[in-house]
Image (cartoon, helix red, strand yellow):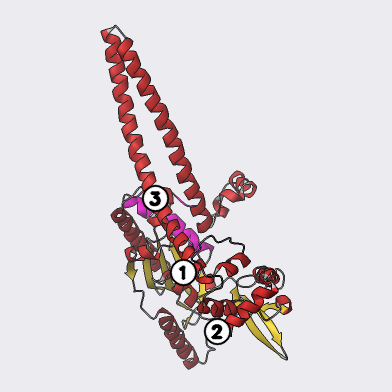
Amino acid sequence: MKCSINPSRTVNKNSGKKSKTCGVSSAWREMNDNRLGRDETIDKEMTRLNVWMEGSSDMDLVGQVEKEVDRINEERRSFGKRGLRADAVSVIAIVEKPNMDYMKNLSYEQRVEFLNKSHEVMKDLLHEWNPNWKMLASVQHHDEFGGLSAHNHSLVMVSTKDKEGIANMCAFKEYNLKFFNHINKNYPARMRSLGFEVEDVRTFDQLSEQEKLERKLHPEEHGVDAVLYKQRKHEELKQSIKNLEVKNEDLSQALEKKIIEITEAPSLSAYKTVVEENENLKSELALKDKIIEKLKYEIESLKLSIQNWKQKFVDISRQAGSKLMKVFGFETKDENMDVFPQQKIITEFNKMQGLIITENPSKYRVVPDEDTIHFKIVSKENDTYKVVEKGFKTRIEAQNRIKEINRVYKSLLPKQKEELLRKVK
C-alpha cells in the first residue's frame, strides 16, 4: 500500500474516485503497539507477544520520513530543481500474511521462527530491487484472531533518483507490476530453500484464460479481505468441531457393538479379529480426541474474548441508564440500574450526538472533511457550520449516521427530553 505524509486529494474525473494513498501517520498508528486498526479480532492483551524486528513502537517514524523529505528537497533545490510534490509517495506498507490454515498448526515459537525467516527474505528482495529503499520499522503481529493470524507488517521508505541522478521519491517507477513479479517469483522459492512449505504465487495476468474466467465467475472465493477471511475461518472451526464430535459418537457406537460381538462370539479367531479392530478404533478415537481438544481450546479463547466484550457492554449500560438504553432498542432488567444516565455519560452523549436533545438533526448536512479522504456531519449556525461528527470513510456512511441520529431524536419522548435536559443543567 502506498503512503504519503500528505495523501493526494485528487479525484479522478472519469471515475469520481479519490486517490487510495494512505497517510503515513495512519499506517503507523495501525502498525505500532497502540493497534488502532479496524480489525475487531485484535486482542490488546496479546499485543505483548508481538515481536519487533526493525525499529520500535515508541519511535518517531513520521518524523524520520519528514526529515528525509526535507533533506531531498534541500538537495534538489541546490541543483535548481523543484522540491517534491506535497503528496509524493514516501513510504510503502508491506504485509506478509501466511495462510492461517498453515500457521494455526505451529506453536508460538515456530510462528516466530517462520516470520523471522520471512522478514529476512523480504529484506533481501527489497535490497535487490532497489538498494536505496530503507526498512524503517517491521513487527510481527501475534494479537489477531487469537494469534492464529500471525503476520509481518513493515513500513519501507522509498528513495529513487531522477534522470540526472538527483534524489527524489518517485514510487510509480519502482512500485509497479514488475516489482510484484519480482517478489512473487523469488519469495516462495527462497522460503522453500529454507525448509518452509510456501507455494508459488501468480498475479492475475499470469493465469490461464480458464483460470481468469473462473475468478470472474466466482469473485467471492478470491481477493477476500482479512476481516471476512477470519470470519469464514471461525465458522469453519465450529463446523470442524461438530463434524469431529459426530464421528467420535459413531466410533463410540461401533466400539460398543464390537464389544457385544466379543461376548457372543464362540470362535477364538473371531475374538482375535475383533480385538485387533477394537485397538484400531481406540487409536483413531485417541487421535480425534486430540484434534477436538485443540479446536476446543481455540474456540474457548474466542469465547473468552466475547465474554470480555459482554462484560464491557454491561458496565456501559449501567452507566448509560435504562431510559437511554431503551432509546437504542435495548430492554434492561437490572433493578439496580439508574433510570437516567450518569452525568459524564449525558455530557459525552450530547457531545457525540451534536446536542441531539436540544437540536433538531434534520438540519445536519454531509460535507467532505479537510483531508478530502473522509466526510463529516455539520450543523449550520447563522453563517457558520459546526462539526457534529467526522471521520466517516464514505458519504453514504455519514448519511446513514444522520438517519440513525434522527431515529434516536424522534424516539425520545417529551418527558424524557425534559428530564435529560434538567440533569444536564
**C-alpha gap between disc 1 and disc 3:** 33 Å
Residue 345 among those drawn in magenta: no
Give the image quarter of residue 422: bottom right
Q: Residue at x 46, y 38 (%)?
A: 242
Determine the secondary structure under disc 1. Answer: strand
**C-alpha gap between disc 2 and disc 1:** 19 Å
Q: Is residue 44 left or right of residue 6?
A: left
Q: Which region of the structure is painted magenta?
A: 177-202
Kind of residue sitting beneath label 2: Ala
Q: To which residue does mark 3 refer?
A: 300
Choose the circle earlier in sequence order: 2 or 1. 2
Give the image quarter of residue 140: bottom left
- Tag nearer the camera, 1 or 3: 3
Residue extending farthest front: 335
Q: Is residue 263 visible?
A: yes
Kind of residue sitting beneath label 3: Glu
